Image: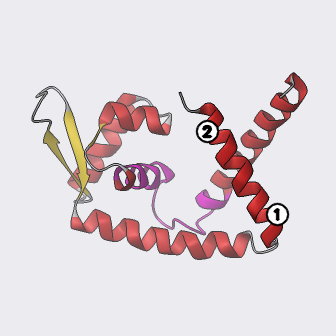
Amino acid sequence: MDKTDAARVVELLEDVRRLFKEHVSGGGASPGLPLTTIVILREIGRQPGVSVSALGRRTGLSKGHVSNVVDRMSIDGLLEKRPDPEDQRCVRIDLTDEGAGLLSRLDHRYQGFWAELLGDVDDIDAARIIDGLESLRCSLRP
């Protein structure tokens, strides 16, 4: 890919990220929940037993911010923290039943929300978008 195309990809990704955040923050998919809470719930759901450091890397948030959000979510009963059996300095995080239930409800709500929002994208364009994003993800993985 040449420099001009690469710059255009980055510009489009930034726009899509901003628009995504605007739609989610607008309450359509997450009424009453901070976006950070949703992001952390989803990441723990994808990788149970994840560490705070890994959550920070995966979300792009600082370790201190993730730690504060995790503490609040733990107090709220959405997740539980436990020491890593191999490294007592490391804390592992899992969803509680309440957190898993909330994540399930959010995922169900997201599916409907995004299906409606992206309803004008036809099947051929959807397949192209998915293929392109999967290719980009593969190129960016270490």
The magenta-colored residue range is 23-44
State the residue position of label 1.
Answer: 125
| 90 shown above or below 118 | above
| 84 shown above or below 79 | above
Magenta highlight on residue 98 = no
Q: Residue at x 29, y 63 (%)?
A: 99
Name the spot of residue 68 as percent of width and height, x first: 32, 38
- Secondary structure category for the residue under label 1: helix
Quarter where residue 23 is shown: bottom right
Q: Which colour scheme is used?
A: secondary structure
The three-letter amino acid code for the residue at tag 1 is: Asp
Residue in the foreground of this view, choosing between 25 and 55: 55
Residue in the foreground of this view, choosing between 63 and 89: 89
Which circle's residue, 2 or 1, is located before the other in the chain? 1
Name the spot of residue 34 as percent of width and height, x first: 47, 54
Give yes or no for contact between labels 2 and 1 (Cβ–Cβ under 8 Å). Answer: no
**Distance Cα–Cα, label 2 vs label 1:** 20 Å
Q: Which residue is drawn at 80% across and 37% down?
A: 9
Q: Which residue is drawn at 78% across and 57% down?
A: 128
Q: Can residue 5 be seen in this view?
A: yes
Name the spot of residue 70 as percent of width and height, x first: 30, 44
State the residue position of label 2.
Answer: 138
